[in-house]
Image (tube, helix red, strand yellow):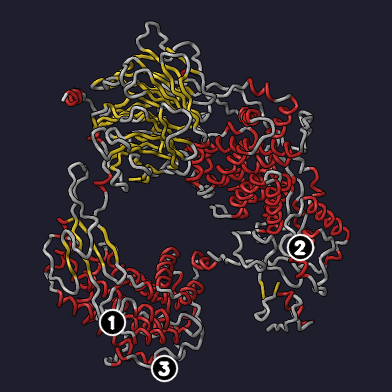
Amino acid sequence: MVNSEKDRASLLRVKALASRGRLDTVSQQMASHPQYLESFLRTQHYILYMDGPLPLPYRHYIAIMAAARHHCKYLVSLHSAQFLRVGGDPSWLQGLEAAPPRLQQLDHINKVLAHQPWLTARSHIQALLKTGEQCWSLAELVQAVVLLAHCHSLCSFVFGSGSDPDIAATPRVPHGTPPGFCLCDAANGNTTLSPAPGAPAGKTQRRRSLDSSCEVACFREQIQKEEKERKGDRKGVSQTLPHADAEEEEEAMCSADPSRFVKDPEFGYQEFTRREEDHFQDYSWEDHGFSLVNRLYSDIGHLLDERFRNVASLPFPHSPDLKRAIWNYIHCIYGIRYDDYDYGEVNRLMERGMKLYIKAVACYPDSSKTPLCPLSWAPVKASEKVHVNVLVMEARLQAELLYALRAITQYMIA
Amino acid sequence: MEKMTKVSTINGRTMFCHLDAPANAISVCRDATQVVVAGRNIFKIYGLEEDGFVERLNLRVGRKPSLNFSCADVMWHQMEENLLATAATNGAVVTWNLARPCRNKQEQLFTEHKRTVNKVCFHPTEVHMLLSGSQDGFMKCFDLRKKESVSTFSGQSESVRDVQFSMKDYFTFAASFENGNVQLWDIRRPDRYERMFTAHTGPVFCCDWHPEDRGWLATGGRDKMVKVWDMSTNRVKEIYCVQTIASVARVKWRPERRYHLATCSMMVDHNIYVWDVRRPFIPFATFEEHKDVTTGIVWRHQHDPYYLLSGSKDSTLYQHMFKDASRPVDRANPEGLCFGLFGDLAFAAKESLMTAPSSVGEVGRKTYPGGDRRYPIFFFKKPDVTEQFAQVSSALSVFESEAGSAVGMDWFIKTAQSYLLSGKPFGELCEHNAQVAKRLNRPQESTTWTMLRIMFSEPANPSMSANHNLNKSGNLPLVNSFGMKEMSAALNERNKENRQDNIHNLDSNHNNNDDNEETEGSEGQAEYLFGDAELDDDDLYSMEHENPAAEETEYLLPQEAFPIRHEIMDHPSAPEPLQEKPESPHVSGSEAESMCLTPMESFSLISVSQLLFSPHLPPKFFCPIVKEMLCYYAEQGDVQTAVSVLIVLGERIRKEIDELTQEHWYMSYIDLLQRFELWNVSNEVIKLSTCGAITCLNQASTTLHINCSNCKRPMSNKGWICDRCHQCASVCAVCHHVVKGLFVWCQGCSHGGHLEHVKDWLKQSDHCPAGCGHLCEYT
């Protein structure tokens, strides 16, 4: 059982690595929950690359905008590179002012959703959809909103799992096919650099011996080693195809300061002041959010639904109560309260350190600012921390989506 | 009888009142005189007076009402008129006794559920029995004489969305779940359900037992479906299914109408629909009053089918009268049309239309009033007294294709295959295509091509073409003089028919009459003439005065490329200097000579010695005419000609016709080509088109399904790793990386890799880079 889980996880990683040429730290972290990772990757792939009204460069640019709100350098550079790869105009990366006005319009809702989603109102939607030269269509807007929410919450995860600070160490394996990193070798634990084309003998043999039970550690080690060696003799890789170098430069260039994609950087999270009338239970994901989002952006509802379900079904080491407490606590931070939950339970079940940690990860996932509270919470196991981070991410994603979709519903009714 | 008198005392009209807050649920008391409205911030009883709602009682008391007043659901007891139950959003189940003397009518409070209670339900005949279903996945049965629940049912699955006691079986209740399941329980056996089945994908929001039919259960779900299940058999069977346009929030059987049920939706759609489950495609009646989603619907009296009450998130409470409902079926189109495999055409329309005096039936038209053995009639329903739909009896006509006539679209296929669209000078292309059309006995198209060649070719040698022009241009007025009149008559005739519907198009695409093969347009026409009686009264009248024979002769006349001549007549002479011509880019210069050297047969018969206008009209001059002609062909259904001309003319005409129209033509033609499996032609057309939307067709569905090179099993959806053997598929034999672009392989040993790598490799070595010893060759 455990073994098959492991296999599954490693296979997923291998697949991700093979198709994207890199295994990002996010996937590596999540790999301790393979079932969840699968649905996460599927959703992400769908919203970034599959059918949808927005052109691919737009999607990545929106992702950049979203990540920049939280100063998440990791995601900004990742999507900047992908933005260029799908043919985006490099000049847009100079800053938000350089982007088309349509994308600039999105800045406001981006800001609100990122920090105080409860302020999202019908008027925001209306302003974006107002007919004009630069107007958005409803379908485009829904995809944009899903993207924004996805990236905001992913920032929380990146921050929580500490993937962001070690950007420098992030494996930067060039994409596409050029040599520099050979999958087969890595899988074998064989660390020779990509072979010179003159030594083919025995290669097929070795490929056959590819072992399915390759471990994360192996990958990481391999990748990092690789990285170092590559850094060591960048000149030496002249046999790489020319565009590999170009990409390298691009990435180096885009990993610059995210703040240029942000207007109004002072805007941040503020305590949600409880307003009695703003009960949110009348708008739930199962009943309302799903139907609306699936209607306007087909199939995404099912994918997100699967994500939420997978999170709910992840076995939590302590108790389901604690899990529900975490989830409801995050929703509460974002102003969504449930009638049928006793919020006293949050304090009973969660120690202070954990609460602070969760709040920091959910609301201030910004490593560029000094954290408001020390991240003192230290779980027993690393996988537990990942689990909590995943919970934070998903709860936050759902909260943002609900606010955005409710605003869209209100717009549609009016 | 007592029933009936009771019903007759109900009267009223469509009316509404504003509530203070959005409603979540409503329920009526047994005698249909009062309705209770419950919501997060509202809990009130309204009296139903003849001319309006009157607020009777506000149950929400206290300065700061507790969450127990925040209702997700409410039900009024159907036996005990003072008893109500609510499901609170905080998980409490509350009963209310209206007979209590104080302001607070709350009687009992059960706080056993941990999560929101979604539904409460009184037993229809047992006074003290109450059932609840909650988000926590449990259902509880309460005896109102006791302080606690008497039994708890665990669904073992996700949240309970609805619970309903069976109307007929004392002990049975149904519960629907968020995971799509429906369970049947026996109230005496809390340990496990009697049966369970999956009713929907996604949550089942509601269910309702049929008031009369034992064992019929209607369910509605987030998958936008309403299903009716027959539980009386051993295996639960889906007997009806209605597809709505939004997730179904509530479903309620209509009293006294066996097959009717009312639904409202959870999101987006604010209307209430009443469906006849046997007619699942169109609602029987629609109530369109609400401005926000309808959250509660209830028939006012359990034996009266004419009053429906509804509460909504828009904070209104409505009483809908059935007579005021809108009936979508009245606006529906009762005509139907379908093609058979072999070109037969079936057409069904109201009998009243079909009985119009028909012209003499010819070529294979047969009418089957009421049905025929060979064509089992699905639309001719037996009148059913219980059915409320207006009886529409339809008559079916079947137009059979004639046996022995040229099979179907032969000409289309041949034309598509033999037309040349590119690769030669313009003049040659036109000439070639003209010949093709002529061979296939389509003189009109043939002439069109010839005319195009003449109009758009560049005269190389003025004197020569001037000479020549005598023949050509001279004949124009002549043709006009004898052709015009009948032609316009025929045209009018056509236009009249064209507007009718797309019969025409279909017709022309699939027609089998061989004698009409020249033009699609006339072909459709001809067939049409014979059968027209069934189609439209208007048309009938316009045709009556002409007999078919006369028309047929009329038909042949206009085929001399008439639309073109017409315009020329209007501008008999418009001499233009030679220099102005070449402004339109040409495919090649050599096309010029081909222009007029060989007189066409059609022209050669007539010779006029008068030079009407200079031969050097700029090609641009003809554009409006050509455009008109293309539109005409497209209109006639001969999109083939339109597109072919469009491609051959290229830049000469492109700007004249708006992108959308072009795109539309291309799409139609490509669609046709693909139906006839003319993939090559279709691809050529796609390639030659200049519309962005068309050229990108070639980018679509470029998925290639591959097998793993190691285990020979199909590769999974995406990725470069085989699921089964966990190896990289399609690895380059030279660099051992996954090949993500062009993959070249040796047909001898089937090893290969990156195009560049293999190329380089084989420059140095003769052997296969994989080391298999094969002597590969790169060519």
For disc 1, the neighbor class at 10 Å (few under 14, some 14 to 19, many from 20) is: many
The residue at 33%/14% (across/down) is B82
Q: Which residue is mark 3?
A: B464
Q: Position of residue B630 (x, y in %)?
A: 37, 72
Q: How many marks?
A: 3
Q: Residue furthest top?
A: B101
Q: Earlier in the sequence, mark 1 or mark 3?
A: 3
| Residue type of the residue flagged with mark 1 | Glu
Subunit bearing disc 2: A
Q: Nearer the viewer, mark 2 or mark 1?
A: 2
| Residue type of the residue flagged with mark 2 | Cys
Subunit bearing disc 1: B
For disc 2, the neighbor class at 10 Å (few under 14, some 14 to 19, many from 20) is: many
Q: Which residue is mark 2?
A: A184
Residue A96 in sight here: no
Direction from residue B451 to residue A399 in the image, left or right:
right
Q: Position of residue B592 (x, y in %)?
A: 46, 88
Q: Nearer the viewer, residue A143 or B483?
A: A143
A184 is higher (above) or lower (below) than B96 = below
Q: Position of residue B648 (x, y in %)?
A: 45, 78
Q: Quadrant of the C terminus of chain B?
A: bottom right
Q: Which residue is mark 1?
A: B560
Measured Cα–Cα span from mark 1 to mark 3: 26 Å
Q: Nearer the viewer, mark 1 or mark 3?
A: 1
